[in-house]
Each structure stands twice: as C-alpha cells, then as structure tokens.
Image (cartoon, grey):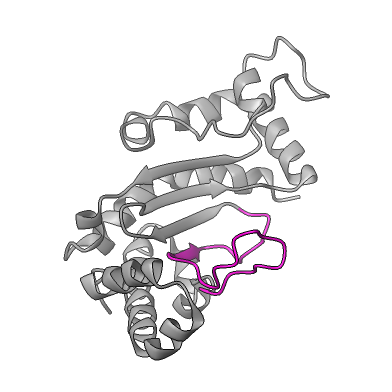
Amino acid sequence: MSSQISKDTFNFLSELHLNNNRDWFTENKELYTNAQQNMISFIENLISEMGKYDEEILKTDPKKTLFRIYRDVRFSKDKSPYKTNMGASLGVGKGSQKAGYYLHVEPEKSFLAAGIYMPDSAALKTIRKEISLYSQDFLKIVNDKNFKKLFKELDQEDQLKKIPQGFEKEDPMAEFLKLKNFIVVYSLKDEDVTKKDAAKKFAEIFEAAKPLNDFLNRALEF
C-alpha cells in the first residue's frame, strides 16, 4: 500500500493535459498504468485508515472506486478523449443514492468531498424533510467547530431561489432546504497530495465529514 500519491502520477496528468489525444496516450500507456496502480495502492491505504472509525468502508474494493479516465464525448463540444484527473468514489457505488466520499486528483485542482451530489427527486425530498424535522441534529453537525474549520459550510453553488414546495416559507431551515446538493469540499494543494502521510491526513478530514454522511444516509433509508 502507498501512503502517498506519487509525483509521477501528477506528472502523467500534467502531460496528458498538454497531449490529450489517442496517439500520445497509446504511446505512453505504461505511464497511465503506473499512475492507476499508484492510485489504487493509495486508496487501499486510505480505506485502511478510514476503517479505524468506519468499519463499513472496509468493504470497499479499491479497484472499483476509480472512475474511468475515458471521457464520454457523445454530447460534448469538447472532444478530448481523456479526463485530466483521477477521481475515486469511496463508500458508495457510482450513481448510488447514498452519501459517500470522493477523492479528486488533478494538478492545482485536487480536492476531497463528502455528502451526496445530485440526488434524484425522491431522495432530495426525503433529505429536505429530514433536515426540516431534525433541524437540531443537522445544525449540530454543520456548526461543529472542527467541521466548520475544515469545510466552512455546505456547497452553495446550486440551489433554488425559493423554498421548495411542501415546506413552510418560514421554516428556520429554509436556506438548507433550497440546496440541490448536500456536499462539503476541502481543497488540496499539490504538496498535500504528495506528502508521505497523505492517506492518514485525508482520512482525518473525511472523519470530520462522517456525521454529515451518517445524517444523510439515515434519511435515505427508505
């Protein structure tokens, strides 16, 4: 297991950004294979560290966490065939209606995230009801000192202008009920990713987000 993501992995992604075409990728397939193996080894270590506070995460297969590097260009104006990042979803199957953890590795754009992104309408409604009914439980999580230090607040990028139907306009949780995603993000510097103890540090950051995931998954057990 690797406790860090190697600089070679970063260098591969940087080169791919400059040479995003099939010929270069084919000629340098070994670089991709090495980067992929480094990521899997790192994720195996990360899962082991997270397992110290979340036994369920130990069931995760490191090899199945990575997203494909090949882009779906069918409906995109950008026809670049490859993603210039490596992403991994931990603790939840891709596309599942469940809160989990996400690792994004990309030169100058790496980050950690937790929560649930773009839940379907049924899951979204259920989460909003849980927040409205158990507001004190939710506020205790998002106002926690360590949580706020690491994440500040839930991502506000995509939200409704008005409170959704089915909820009172005066609901004290109105601002949270307008959200369409329930995620927190921790931005990483390149040197954070390549440090020797990166797996341990990332696990500690994810641990701070675990209460949010637990709350969301409690709501989604329907």
Check residue 103 for magenta coloring: no
Residue at the farthest left position: 196
Answer with left or right where residue 91 lies relative to residue 94: left
Give the magenta part as a residue range. 69-98
Q: In which quarter of the image is the N terminus?
A: bottom left
Q: Residue 210: percent from the left, percent from the top? A: 45, 48
Check residue 73 for magenta coloring: yes
Between 17 and 181, the one lying in front of the other is 17
Total marks placed: 0
Residue at the farthest right position: 166
Q: Residue at x 21, y 63 (%)?
A: 194
Q: Residue 166: percent from the left, percent from the top? A: 83, 24
| Residue 130 vertical position relative to residue 2 in the rendered view, above or below | above
| Residue 91 vertical position relative to residue 210 in the rendered view, above or below | below
Q: Which residue is drawn at 55% across and 74% down?
A: 70
Q: Residue at x 52, y 77 (%)?
A: 64
Between 105 and 58, the one lying in front of the other is 105
Q: Residue 18: percent from the left, percent from the top? A: 37, 67
Answer with left or right where residue 175 lies relative to residue 40: right
Chief SS of the magenta region: loop
Residue at the farthest top position: 170
Q: In which quarter of the image is residue 131?
A: top right
Q: Residue 169: percent from the left, percent from the top? A: 74, 12
Between 109 and 159, the one lying in front of the other is 109
Q: Which residue is drawn at 58% across and 51% down?
A: 99
Answer with left or right where residue 81 lies relative to residue 127: left
